């Protein structure tokens, strides 16, 4: 099953077997200027993704012909299209498994339209530093010159230790995405023996104190409980 709206906006592929959820998503997307395609199975979703190269994919995990994690894995064999999992599975292990498989974000059903559209906006502007040659990352009060390894807050340089800087720039490379604890430990500590999630909490606390206006209520360096962290792009 597939259909496309007449809007000139970005193309979103919905892979969802529940008719009521497809209707809800269709109304939400059309009302916000997106084009869309629909698939009721994993295989149909993979076929449509191959044919139409959507700008983002909304993917349910509980599909009739294959698990959504397999769909993510097969997509990642050939494309980097942002994938937002939308699932009734709300356990931390489900979220971690989906993100480790290559999903960019995870939204637990039921969810509101505003949150869905915000997640889509973030997914569509992913690119950030990892997809461009631009060496300067700016967000709110921050300006990070990745070539010079210089971090400024309100125009004032802030000193970060090598590990703090590595953690911060890893989050910048994946800006807007949830990055799992496992992935951060691997990228920042290189899988060093003894590296534990406690390290992440300590260094994230230090980063927040140096970079956030209110460290106890961080605006950008967000925790995804039990899963990992996200550099939030909504300003």
Image (spheres, rainbow, N blue to C red):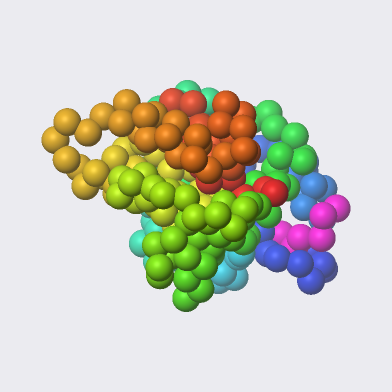
The quarter of the displayed image where residue 10 is located: bottom right
* Lateral position of residue 205 relative to residue 217, left or right: left
Residue 210 on image: x %, y %: 49, 40
Question: Residue sitting at 37 percent across and 35 percent down?
Answer: 203
- In this view of the protein, which residue sits in the foreground, 210 or 217? 210
Please provide the residue range marked out in magenta.
Answer: 31-36
206 or 48, which lies in front?
206
x and y, in percent, of residue 162 in the image: 30, 49
Residue at 22% from the left image edge and 33% from the top image edge: 195
Q: In this view, does 195 lie to the left or right of 232?
A: left
Rendering quarter of residue 34: bottom right
Seen in the picture, residue 219 relative to 104 is either above or below; the reply is above
Nearer the observer, 168 or 178: 168
Can residue 96 be seen here? The reply is no
Question: Which residue, as the protein is rendered here, is positioned at the far left?
Answer: 193
**Residue placed most toward the observer, 158 or 224:** 158
- Which residue is pictured at 44% across the width and 61% down the height? 150
The answer to whether 110 is drawn above or below residue 212 in the figure is: above
User: Measured from the top left, where is residue 101 in percent x and y?
Assistant: 38, 46
49 in magenta? no
Q: Is residue 213 visible?
A: yes
Rendered residue at 56%/31% (across/down): 215
Where does the image place residue 163, in percent across and percent down from the top left? 31, 45
Residue 33 within the magenta-colored segment of the rendering:
yes
Residue 7 position by quadrant: bottom right
In this picture, residue 193 sits left or right of residue 25: left
């Amino acid at each position: 099953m597939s259909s496309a709206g007449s809007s000139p906006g970005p193309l979103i592929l919905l892979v969802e077997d529940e008719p009521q959820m497809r209707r809800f998503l269709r109304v939400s997307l059309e009302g916000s200027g997106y084009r869309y395609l629909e698939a009721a199975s994993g295989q149909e979703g993979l076929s449509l993704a191959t044919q139409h190269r959507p700008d983002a994919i909304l993917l349910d995990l509980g599909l009739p012909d294959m698990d959504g994690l397999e769909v993510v894995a097969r997509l990642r064999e050939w494309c980097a299209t942002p994938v937002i999992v939308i699932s009734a599975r709300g356990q931390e292990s489900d979220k971690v498994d989906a993100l480790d498989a290559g999903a960019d974000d995870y939204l637990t059903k039921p969810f509101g339209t505003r949150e869905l559209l915000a997640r889509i906006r973030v997914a569509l502007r992913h690119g950030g530093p990892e997809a461009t040659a631009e060496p300067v990352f700016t967000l709110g009060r921050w300006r990070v010159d990745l070539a010079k390894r210089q971090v400024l807050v309100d125009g004032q340089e802030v000193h970060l230790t090598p590990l703090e800087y590595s953690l911060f720039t890893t989050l910048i490379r994946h800006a807007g995405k949830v990055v799992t604890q496992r992935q951060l430990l691997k990228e920042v500590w290189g899988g060093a023996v003894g590296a534990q999630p406690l390290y992440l909490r300590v260094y994230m606390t230090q980063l927040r104190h140096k970079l956030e206006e209110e460290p106890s209520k961080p605006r950008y360096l967000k925790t995804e409980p039990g899963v990992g962290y996200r550099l939030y792009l909504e300003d």
